[in-house]
Amino acid sequence: MVADSLLEFGIAELLNNYAPDCRLGKVWGASVTRQTGVRRPVFVEPQQSRMGAGSDLDYCGCVTNYRFEDFKPTIDESTGEPDERTKGYFASTSVGFHDARSTDAALKGRVERAIADGRNLTAVYADQEYDHGLDSSIPVATFAWFEKLVNVGGGRLVPGHLITWITVRPTHRRRGLLRSMMTTDLAEAKANGYPFAALTATEGGIYSRFGFGVATWSHSIEVDTSPGFKMVREPDRRVEMCLPSELRELAPEIYDRFMRTSPGAMQRQQTYIERATGALNTETGEEDRGVRAALHFDEQGEPDGYVSYKFAGWSKTPPTVDLIDFVAVTDAAYASLWSFLAAIDLSTRVTFGESAEYSPLPWLLTDSRRVKTVATEDNIWIRILDVKAALEARPWYVPGTLTIDIDDSLDLAGGRFTITSDGESAEVTPASESTPADLGLGIAELGSLYFGGADPVILARAGRIDEQTPGAAVLASAMFSLGRAPYSPNGF
Ligand SMILES: CC(C)(COP(=O)(O)OP(=O)(O)OC[C@H]1O[C@@H](n2cnc3c(N)ncnc32)[C@H](O)[C@@H]1OP(=O)(O)O)[C@@H](O)C(=O)NCCC(=O)NCCS
């Protein structure tokens, strides 16, 4: 009930605050009922349209009432096909992400994967429908979340609240629908006990206002594998090619072991297995028979790494192999799989879009310039929902005491806390106003520090952290480090 009244307040208050900007008028009723899975309508009195007001951001037609519904993706048992509500939901996300309209078979595959991932969907419907316009059963906005385990350091796995599939139809954007869905969801995730939420972002400018900070990055790399590619030390080369279908059983097991070694890594969704095995080309929604795969074996002959890849075609210059997935539990597997890739004939370049920000690859080679980073992208964004639970869940390898003052504009997790680390774990206790803070920071900045990926010294230099005790940023840099740079080869 506490959560319900919080959520009720959230929608009405936030839309009331938001609406004057958009000149849509006052929200005069809003309520959330999670028990039934249906949120009652948010009514917005239409006022003056802002079309023609000259803003390139706002498109406000005549707004109407919105109805929010929470549900699970469903396949109708009697027909074996996705039910109408699920079909409408996916029709909407494909508009938002510029995907082609799915065939029936591709749609069913998407829905099956969404069910396997345990995704929870939110759809927003407008009550107004125009002749010839999209049917009102297709939502004007979508949102989804699912739970996956996240390595918060030292192999400690914590359930994370993963947010995805956020879309708002262009004709309904900039009216506060994202804000409404996000603030409602974060409040509910907190009430349900999740220490943090996570997402990956299509654009970098949207989510810090909701308290998300970039916590892991990935590199898109091109590796020159032409003659002369050589490693400083000869790897064991215990690699053999396999049918990609072999990865159906092996890839999840190998990934699960890898995930425990890499801070920031999290359980992956079903799509990754389908892509690695060639069962799914995400662009066509169909099988991909061009996919090849190889495994690395440990000294006992057990697989401990794999790569899945595809030749980019004869028209590409230089001839290129594109990696679909690359997961190595050990450094030996990592080195040997790269030596295998370099040995593929009739190809002199390997590309990989999800390489670690800090990988051993350049250091493995006698000529590190062969590894070219062509793009660096933010990957996982973290939103801390419970400071004590989140910080106590992770290991702390450097002893010390730090008092941090956290500002949270959504009032979900701010306050002053003292972190006392004994070099293994930390106790995190609320601190009184009379305890001086060593560092002042926003909740988004705390998210960026969470896996030790962002450096507090740099954040202080950028004015994102206020260093109130001289030297506190350097101490925080040591204390927040998780020993190994975070890396999460995952997008959702
Ligand atoms: C991004 C998107 C979801 C925004 O939805 P929306 O309902 O228009 O957003 P809201 O009206 O609730 O805006 C909430 C806030 O975010 C800001 N915002 C929205 N989209 C933004 C963008 N692309 N860049 C920067 N800020 C943005 C708004 O200005 C507003 O700011 P404020 O409340 O602090 O003043 C929508 O434009 C969309 O569907 N885009 C295509 C799909 C996509 O990129 N999804 C994101 C997946 S990670």
Image (cartoon, grey):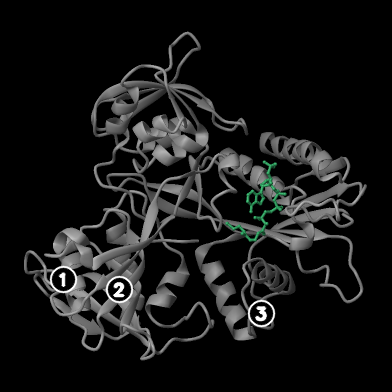
Q: Amino acid at mark 1?
A: Ser
Q: Is residue 188 above or below residue 103?
A: above
| Above-or-below relation of 177 to 411 | below
Where is residue 20 drawn, in percent x and y? 83, 39
Mark 2 secondary-structure assignment: helix
Distance CA(mark 2)–CA(mark 3):
32 Å
Asked if residue 330 can be seen in this view, the reply is no
Question: Residue at 11% of width from left, 65% of height from top?
Answer: 366
Pick whichever, 430 or 479, lies toward us: 479
Q: Which residue is mark 3?
A: 101
Question: Which of labels 1 and 2 is toward the front?
Answer: 1
State the mark number for residue 94.
none
Q: Earlier in the sequence, mark 1 or mark 3?
A: 3
Between tags 2 and 3, which lies in front? 3
Structural crowding at the residue carrying mark 1, measured as other residues with C-alpha within 10 Å and reported as few (<14), some (14–19) or many (≥20) = many
Residue for badge 1: 336
Q: Is residue 268 left or right of residue 87?
A: left
Residue type (three-letter) at the residue carrying disc 3: Arg
Question: Is 94 placed left or right of 372 in the picture?
Answer: right
Q: CA distance from mark 1 to mark 2?
A: 18 Å
Residue tagged by mark 2?
A: 250
Q: Look at the image and tell me whether residue 27 can be seen.
A: yes
